[in-house]
Amino acid sequence: MSWIFTIFISALLLPPLSLILLGSLGWALLNHHPRLARSIIALTLILLCGLSMPIISDRLLTQFEHYPIIDLAHPPHADAIIILGAGSYFDAPEYGGDTVSRYALERLRYGARLERATHLPVAVSGGNPAGGTPEAYLMRDALRQDFNVTTRWVEPNSNTTWENAHASRALLPSQVKRIYLVTHAWHLPRASYAFEHAGFTVIPAGTGYSPTQHISPIDFIPQPRGLNNSYFAIHEAIGLIWYRLKG
């Protein structure tokens, strides 16, 4: 229930639902407060346009991507690698059932590369808030079948990043203190905060960095990718604020 409540509140605060609600408010006020209504509708359109432009959304995401990239030729010392889940691809016909989402696959790919560079034991963390097979089991199977990497620890009960951290701390041996934390670069500040709060020393290991060097004219055109990235950026900002209040 706590996960459902969190998703509901997030949907109200994040685009596109937040923009739909704001625009609906403007529409409802047209008859009684036309000037205010037109201002609200105009603001909604401006926000929708701006948040849908990759030139803006990519830069919103980069505000959270401030951890340095790991030099895999000379990786820092650690005790283990923890890879965080990122959703499931349910009833995948080409795989004959549930498997990891494309975002989780990006994390697993980098986690596998990190494992080959460090030869450290690997843990995966992720529950099944939306039903189906817990993400951690799907991640374990993908690591073994697609990357030939063995998973030492499987944490299948957590439904949020905060739960990932504390459930992983309860599962891993006490001597595992310094970890590589593998997740998307824009998720690292919030994830690192949660895992440090749980008692780990974190080496942020990010993947999926936002493009900032190659700008093209199409980046100035509103498109779904832009709105999706803005969603992630706003989600992380709200999550960081909430975690710091909670912590």
Image (tube, rainbow, N blue to C red):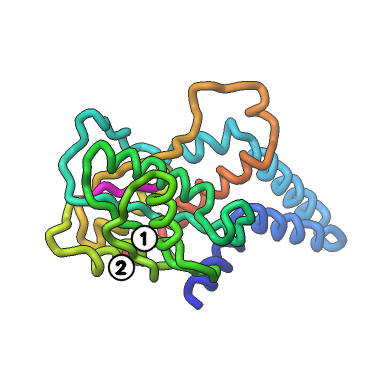
Q: Where's the C terminus, which quadrant?
A: bottom left
Left or right: 6 in relation to 205: right
Which residue: 71% across, 48% down?
44
Segment tinted magenta in the rendering: 179-183
Corner quadrant of residue 24: bottom right
Q: Can residue 199 be seen by looking at this rendering?
A: yes
Decide: few, some or many residues near mark 1? Use Cα within 10 Å; few <14, some 14-19, many ≥20: many
The reply to whether the magenta stretch includes residue 67 is no
Q: Can residue 193 be seen by looking at this rendering?
A: no
With respect to residue 117, does 19 lie above or below?
Answer: below
Q: Predominant secondary structure in magenta?
A: strand
Residue 116 screen position, x and y as percent: 28, 39
Q: Answer yes or no: do the residues labelled 2 and 1 have beta carbons within 8 Å?
A: yes
Q: What is the three-letter code of the residue carrying label 1?
A: Ser
Residue 219 screen position, x and y as percent: 63, 28
Residue 226 screen position, x and y as percent: 62, 39
Residue 80 screen position, x and y as percent: 22, 51
Check disc 2 and report its element: helix, strand or loop.
helix
Q: Which residue is mark 2?
A: 167
Which residue: 69% across, 36% down?
222
Check disc 1 and report its element: helix, strand or loop.
strand
Left or right: 127 in relation to 227: left
Q: Nearer the viewer, residue 182 or 195?
A: 182
Q: Nearer the viewer, residue 215 or 171?
A: 171
Corner quadrant of residue 204: top left
Q: What is the three-letter code of the residue carrying label 2?
A: Ala
Residue furthest to the right in view is 31
Report the disc number at residue 125: 1
Disc on the earlier residue, 2 or 1: 1
Residue furthest to the left in view is 175
Measure the alpha-carbon separation of dots 2 and 1: 8 Å
Which residue: 59% across, 56% down?
14
